[in-house]
Structures are given as C-alpha cells and as structure tokens.
Image (tube, helix red, strand yellow):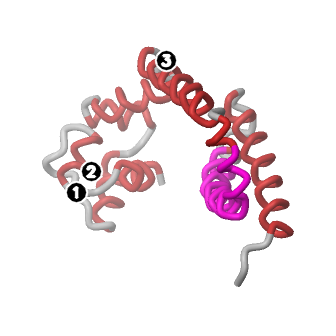
Amino acid sequence: MKLNRNYITPFISLVFLVVGISGFLMLFHLFDGYTEVVHEILGLFFIICAIFHIILNWKALIIYFKKGVFFPALLGVLVLSVILIISERMSPPIDLIIFNKMVKAPINDAFRALDVNYEKASEKLKENGLSIEEATTIEDIWINNDSNPEKVIDLIME
C-alpha cells in the first residue's frame, strides 16, 4: 500500500487537534479520567501519523535542514523540555505525592486511608496469584510478587 497525503494529512491534523485539546483539558484537570486515556492512546497514534508525514515530506524537510532552522528549533524544544522536567521534579503534582506516600505507608494505615478491607483485599490478591504475607507496605506487594503497581492497586481497589 502506497502512502498517500490524502489520508495522512487529515489523520495527523485531526489527531493533533484531539491530542492538543485533551492535553489542555488535562492541564486544567477538566474531565479527568476521560481525557488521559484519549490523550495517551491518540498520542501514540499521532506518533505513527507523524512518522508517515515525515516520510511523505522528507524532501521538503531537507530544505529546513539546509536553511539551518531545524537545529535551533530542536535546541529550543530540548531546553523547554528540560525546564519542564526539572520544574516537575522540584514541585511534583499533589496526586503523585499522595500516591507515593500511600504505597510506602504501613499497609494497615494505607488500607484504612483507602477504606479497603484488609481481608477482602488479601483474598482478591491471592485469587490473582499475589501474596500479601511478607508485605509491610503496598509497594512491598508488587515488589515481593514481581508484579506491577497498577495491577496491585487495581486489585486492592476493586
């Protein structure tokens, strides 16, 4: 199948619009829970569309390399990215702070704060092949069971 601008351009334009709007909504915490999944999945699709777009427009992009405008743009994006990453590290979002403290707190305290019944959570984890026996924190559960945090949290919160 031959790549065709008639398909790639509308896709990349529309996906760019949706990813941009969902990013804006996420920035202001509007429709949280809905926008994140749209932003992440369509962000991956945007990358695929962008690769096809670059392939289709490679000759035109070479002109930007020759004019010397690509590298200053690259430098600007890298500097902005580093500033944003450093800013995030210096002042992480409150939900990340709470999550990190919750998974490192004593397991009984964490379950109480989450309004989770220890026995029910233990049983649910056992049904899914995860042991809570040696764990003193929620983090210990996924470390001791060679699992991932998302799976453990999902099972505990069911």
Which residue corresponds to mark 3?
87
Viewer-side residue, 78 vs 142: 78
Query: How busy is the neighbourhood of tag 1: few (under 14 within 10 Å), some, or many (20 plus)?
Result: few
User: How many callouts does the rendering have?
Assistant: 3
Query: How busy is the neighbourhood of tag 2: few (under 14 within 10 Å), some, or many (20 plus)?
Result: many
Residue range corresponding to the magenta coloring: 36-63
Residue at left offset 62%, top offset 42%: 65
Compared to residue 3, the image places residue 22 above or below, namely above
Q: Quadrant of residue 68?
A: top right
Earlier residue among tags 3 and 1: 3
Q: Secondary structure at mark 2?
A: helix
Which residue corresponds to mark 1?
146
Q: Is residue 153 left or right of residue 118?
A: right
Residue 111's label in the rendered image is none
Magenta: predominant secondary structure element?
helix
Query: Looking at the picture, which amino acid does disc 2 mark?
Result: Trp
Quadrant for the N terminus, please. bottom right
Residue at left offset 17%, top offset 51%: 144
Q: Secondary structure at mark 1?
A: loop
Q: CA distance from mark 2 to mark 3?
A: 29 Å
Q: Quadrant of residue 126?
A: bottom left
**Residue 97: percent from the left, percent from the top?**
42, 24
Residue furthest bottom as drawn: 1
Residue at left offset 44%, top offset 36%: 114
Q: Nearer the viewer, mark 3 or mark 1?
A: 3
Determine contact: label 1, label 2, CB under 8 Å: yes
Residue at left offset 65%, top offset 63%: 55
Query: Looking at the picture, which amino acid does disc 1 mark?
Result: Asp
Whether 2 is among the magenta residues is no
Query: How busy is the neighbourhood of tag 3: few (under 14 within 10 Å), some, or many (20 plus)?
Result: few
Query: Looking at the picture, which amino acid does disc 3 mark?
Result: Ser
Which residue corresponds to mark 2?
142
